Amino acid sequence: MSKRALTGAEIFDGKDLQSGKALLLDGDLVAGIVAAEAIPADYTVETMRDGTILPGFVDLQVNGGGGVMFNDETTVEGLAAIAEAHASTGTRAFMPTLITDTAKRTRTAVDAVEAAIAQSVPGIVGVHLEGPHLSVARKGAHDPTLIRRMEPNDEAFLIDAAGRLPNVMVTVAPENVTSDQIRRLSDAGIVVSLGHTDCSMAQAQKAFDAGARCVTHLFNAMSQMGNREPGLVGATLASGGVFAGLIADDIHVHAASMGIALAAKSGPGAIFLVTDAMSTVGSDITAFELNGRTVLRKDGRLTLEDGTLAGADLEMARAISVLINRVGVTRETAYAMATSAPAAVLKQPGAFGFFTPSASANAIWIDTDHQSVRGL
């Protein structure tokens, strides 16, 4: 196996940004990070031109890519096409996300993810089921005719899925899922995330107390923070144990709102990046179908014909650029939001999100302007 020393770029290890160092790779495994002058003699030096070496991106909300929507192609072949598209953008771990659909389609999706993992389709670390147990009042682009309460058989199915897959994430609304159901799902190892909900802060906190520990696309399709009712946004920012995904395209959320949220968020739970990507990633398509409705792609925005936002036309590198150049966060913060922070949400993160000695590197390089990404 080849031994390589990658140098000439800064290195973000998942926590810290280091200069004047080299990432040592023994085949695909991390052998260490050392000072450039301490590279062992048996390593071949590969010098980068500026930029940053970092762990591959971790994306917990991927609806499609490569011209394929997971809802339409709940097959290993469909997942492989999505994985290839996102790998080309620097994503090394992702959760295929099924938007609100029928019970039959949901079961087929879980079966497909299980088969894809068994066949070693790169990057797939579990499944994210965004619905159907949401609130019609905050449906967004979800089909309201398919939204419904969680029944005992739904709960049993999810708990069974958690035993078959390394990671299962479900987005639910407290209006359609009880605290007891949330507690049992959480006890089974499922990441319960609140989203597409009009819940009050008290309802959100009750769900958090029951075991929900994440929030889906902060600010979007949820109760907002007001002066007398903080809503889910306020509850999320005030709850230290809760993580939250963020679509940082400066379309779904204003840059100023992102900055306020990042400054206000109580830890150790963190805000992390998601792309909420649709089939457009890695494709030049200008329109596609979602539950029988047309989604239009124009000027970096995806909308239904009535103007409702329907996912995002976004890649992680652009989200990082927005955070740094428009929101004003540090590079370390932006990189962590795309790597180690989402990995921390997972039940089984594997080697993703950090450079861990003797583990797979999954390394990528991103240029100084955050426009170009390539695998290493």
Image (cartoon, helix red, strand yellow):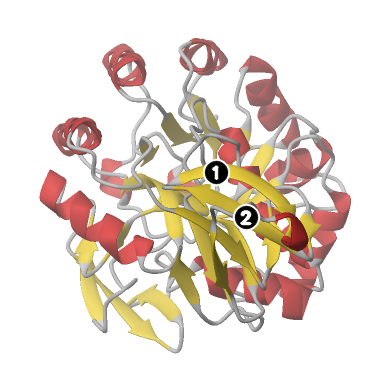
x, y percentage for residue 133?
Answer: 39, 34
Is 102 on the left-hand or right-hand side of 50?
left
- Residue sitting at x 47%, y 50%: 362
**Mark 1 residue crowding within 10 angstroms, few (<14) / some (14–19) / many (20+):** many
Badge 2 marks a residue whose secondary structure is strand
3D distance between C-alphas at marks 2 and 1 = 8 Å
Q: Which residue is mark 1?
A: 30
Image-quadrant location for residue 117: top left
Above or below: residue 242 compared with residue 223:
above
Along the horizontal axis of the image, is 165 left or right of 244?
Answer: left
Seen as rendered, the residue at the extreme front is 41
Kindly identify the residue that appears in the image at 39 percent across and 75 percent down: 302
| Quarter of image, res 158 | top left
Label 2 neighbour load within 10 Å: few <14, some 14-19, many 20+: many
> Disc 2 residue type?
Leu
Is tag 2's residue or tag 1's residue first in the polypeptide sequence? 2
Q: Which percent across, then down, holds residue 346? A: 53, 32
Vertical placement of 149 versus 140: above or below? above
Q: Nearer the viewer, residue 339 or 354?
A: 354
The percent position of residue 319, horizontal first and vertical second, equals 59, 70
For the residues bearing labels 2 and 1, Cβ distance under 8 angstroms: yes
Q: Which one is nearer the viewer's eye here, 184 or 175? A: 184
The image quarter in which residue 354 lies = top right
Secondary structure of the residue carrying tag 1 is: strand
Q: Three-letter amino acid code at disc 1? A: Val
Q: Which mark is residue 249?
A: none
Q: Residue at x 67, y 73 (%)?
A: 8
Residue 354 seen from this side: no
Q: Nearer the viewer, residue 173 or 23?
A: 23
Locate residue 84, reporting x and y percent: 27, 61
Q: Say which residue label 2 marks.
A: 23
